[in-house]
Image (tube, rainbow, N blue to C red):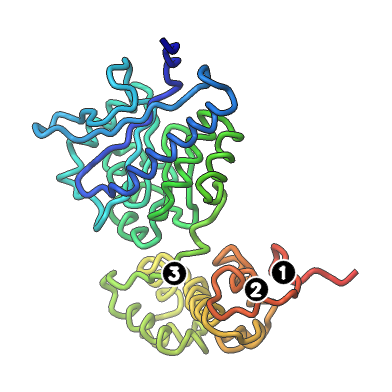
């Protein structure tokens, strides 16, 4: 008879809450299976491995129970609990309440809680994220901030690992979260081998490379909304503080305070996001030179445009076009460095 497998190193539970994306659940299950395979190929039958389980809320609302287990009958409870993305919309407060209570209890007993995309809303209902940094899909970032004002939302980050709480942003960021857990449990070699096998990038991407500017418009301040519509229509050209305050019918100091309260951004930052959004579209769909695009979106100084573009997206304009441009000119010109400028000639 073959020797029995060693006890699992840790159990990762995938929580099937109402509306959870089953594709991510099965994808994570496969990712952890591949990681186990990669380790077994190097170390044989005695290799450490991850136990994978699926959990669903009980019908009586008293918590959750296993409905799938890679090690059926094995003792113990989850060391990690993952809340996958939602298919359509974040879970409601009412649906989340019984699972949030169960999650808090597991956390108190030492489990690490992790979420992907809109799964952060369920994690947020536990109250454990208050005062701490978290991320979610950029599309839901404003909704999350309104629902959980005591959480420090950072939608630029794709993964925020805060030790006992981990949040991942984009809909497909379950790959990043899964690889991070493999790295934590089985080591960096296993993580890189798993990423290579699955043909996915290892962790380290940023969500701001992919997100688009989604301004707050439903804040109820009619004067500020009027300015926002004007900025959108004009591409934020001639958008001086005096011009914006005049458009709003407010004193400059009052305008600054109300604009930031309504939009979450200073007027300068807001205009930068609008201009960069237009520049991204031009970089993706045209072959115009970067300097021309800078001028088209309102920057007389191409160097200043490159710095703002890098600040907002995390990439220089040329690097952005090389990654996302549909009609990009893929020549042999040297790529921009981290500051958005070409390397100096030797």
In terms of image quadrants, where is residue 165?
top left
* Sooner in the amino-acid sequence: mark 1 or mark 3: 3
Q: Which residue is mark 1?
A: 335
Q: Which mark is residue 55?
A: none
- Horizontal and vertical percent position of residue 51: 39, 26
Proximity of marks 1 and 2: CB atoms separated by less than 8 Å: yes
**Which dot, 1 or 3, sits closer to the camera?**
1
**Which dot, 3 or 2, sits closer to the camera?**
2
**Label 1 vs label 2: CA separation?**
7 Å
Q: Measured along the vertical axis of the image, is residue 332 above or below residue 198? A: below
Apparent side of residue 336 relative to residue 157 in the rendered image (left or right)? right
Q: Measured along the vertical axis of the image, is residue 316 above or below residue 81? A: below
Apparent side of residue 324 relative to residue 51 in the rendered image (left or right)? right
Apparent side of residue 306 relative to residue 206 in the rendered image (left or right)? right
* Sooner in the amino-acid sequence: mark 3 or mark 2: 3
Q: Number of labelled discs?
A: 3
Q: Which residue is mark 2?
A: 318
Residue at the location (19% across, 45% down)? 18
Residue extending farthest to the right is: 346
In terms of image quadrants, where is residue 327?
bottom right
**Label 3 vs label 2: CA separation?**
18 Å
Which quadrant, please, contains the N terminus? top left
Q: Which residue is mark 3?
A: 212
């Amino acid at each position: 008879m073959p020797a029995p497998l060693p006890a699992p190193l840790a159990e990762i539970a995938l929580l099937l809450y109402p509306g959870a994306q089953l594709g991510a659940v099965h994808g994570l299950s496969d990712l952890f299976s591949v990681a186990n395979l990669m380790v077994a190929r190097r170390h044989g039958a005695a290799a450490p491995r991850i136990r994978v389980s699926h959990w669903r809320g009980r019908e009586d609302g008293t918590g959750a129970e296993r409905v799938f287990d890679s090690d059926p009958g094995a003792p113990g409870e989850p060391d990690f609990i993952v809340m996958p993305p939602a298919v359509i919309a974040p879970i409601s407060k009412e649906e989340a309440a019984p699972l949030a209570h169960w999650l808090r209890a597991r956390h108190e007993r030492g489990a690490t809680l992790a979420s992907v995309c809109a799964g952060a809303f369920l994690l947020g209902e536990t109250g454990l994220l208050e005062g701490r940094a978290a991320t979610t899909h950029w599309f839901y970032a404003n909704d999350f901030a309104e629902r959980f004002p005591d959480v420090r939302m950072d939608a630029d980050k794709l993964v925020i690992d805060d030790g006992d709480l981990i949040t991942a942003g984009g809909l497909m960021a379950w790959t990043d979260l899964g690889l991070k857990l493999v790295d934590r449990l089985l080591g960096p070699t296993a993580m890189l081998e798993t990423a290579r096998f699955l043909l996915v990038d290892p962790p380290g991407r940023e969500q701001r490379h992919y997100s688009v500017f989604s301004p707050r418009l439903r804040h109820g301040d009619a004067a500020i909304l009027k300015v926002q519509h004007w900025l959108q229509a004009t591409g934020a050209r001639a958008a001086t503080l005096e011009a914006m305050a005049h458009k709003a019918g407010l004193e400059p100091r009052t305008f600054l305070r109300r604009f930031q309260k309504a939009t979450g951004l200073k007027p300068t930052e807001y205009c930068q996001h609008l201009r960069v959004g237009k520049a991204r579209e031009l970089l993706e769909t045209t072959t115009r030179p970067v300097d021309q695009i800078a001028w088209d979106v309102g920057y007389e100084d191409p160097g200043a445009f490159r710095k703002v573009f890098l600040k907002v997206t995390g990439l220089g304009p040329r690097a952005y076009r090389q990654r996302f441009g549909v009609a990009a000119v893929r020549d042999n010109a040297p790529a921009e460095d981290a500051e958005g400028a070409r390397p100096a000639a030797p």
